Amino acid sequence: MSQDQKIEVIVPEDQLMARIDELADRLAPRLTGDWTVVSILIGATPFTSDLMKALARRGVHPMLDVIWLESYRDARESSGRVVVRADLSRQVKDRGVLLLDDVFDTGRTLDFAKHHLLAKGAKEVITCTLTQKPWAPRGEKGVDFCAFDSPGRYLVGYGMDDAGKYRGLPYIGALD
Ligand SMILES: O=P(O)(O)OC[C@H]1O[C@H](OP(=O)(O)OP(=O)(O)O)[C@H](O)[C@@H]1O
Ligand code: HPA
């Protein structure tokens, strides 16, 4: 029996893949030398997988590491506090880092992660998200690369969850 809530498709799967290819075209020339992609668990997992494949098709093979950060848990609003549930497995000292996340909302998670990586000695941190909310920080505090501007609604799918559900949807959707 289906237990789906009403989910409006905001970005269908084919558009997602096309934008990730465009993103890889823009990122590839920046990733020369020693780079590590750091994926923020859990939400960035599908985006990371598809972007890594798109980079590999362009002959770009950075290391891949993860950091598990949590601030929303089952709520639709940030708790205001970012918790590190698991840290990196390798050093980033003197390396460039491409930091990936699914959604840039208050900006708190990415800001925390960026400072965390710089404190570990990363040479440079480039931030990249699949999507950003209309109220997310722009300019100096903004994200460096972003595939989509999203509406000011609660998003699910392609890694994004509502209390742990819907991460497996192959598109970006919005809940009412
Ligand atoms: O810009 P912000 O307001 O910080 O929101 C963005 C963060 O919120 C979500 O993480 P969450 O804490 O829900 O963990 P999850 O990745 O396990 O879903 C999402 O994956 C981002 O990491
Ligand atoms: O819109 C959202 N959806 C899922 N997770 C999120 N984390 C921040 N904003 C969102």
Image (cartoon, rainbow, N blue to C red):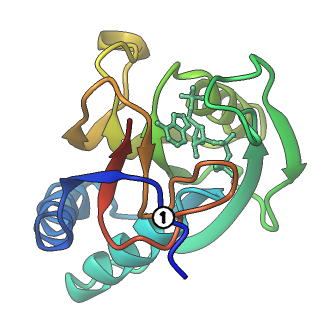
- Residue 108: percent from left, percent from top: 62, 22
- Position of 52 relative to 93 (above/below): below
Q: Quadrant of ligand 1?
A: top right
Residue at point 12% right, 73% down?
Answer: 14
Count how many numbered circles sit on residues in the image: 1
> Is residue 77 shown left or right of residue 17?
right
Answer yes or no: is residue 172 visible.
yes
- Position of 102 relative to 154 (above/below): below
- Residue 39: percent from left, percent from top: 58, 59
Residue most extreme to the front: 1
> Is residue 69 shown left or right of residue 37?
right
Residue at point 50% right, 39% down?
Answer: 124
Instruction: Identify the residue position indicated by label 1 in the image.
Output: 4
Q: Which of the 4 image quadrants contains residue 47?
A: bottom left
Residue at point 59% right, 48% down?
Answer: 162
Q: At label 1, which amino acid type do we have?
A: Asp
Q: Which of the 4 image quadrants contains residue 18?
A: bottom left
- Residue 55: percent from left, percent from top: 29, 76
Q: Secondary structure at mark 1?
A: loop
Name the image quarter holding the N terminus. Answer: bottom right
Answer yes or no: is residue 126 visible.
no
Name the image quarter holding the C terminus. Answer: top left
> Is residue 56 shown left or right of residue 80?
left
- Position of 21 relative to 72 (above/below): below
Residue closer to the observer: 85 or 156: 156
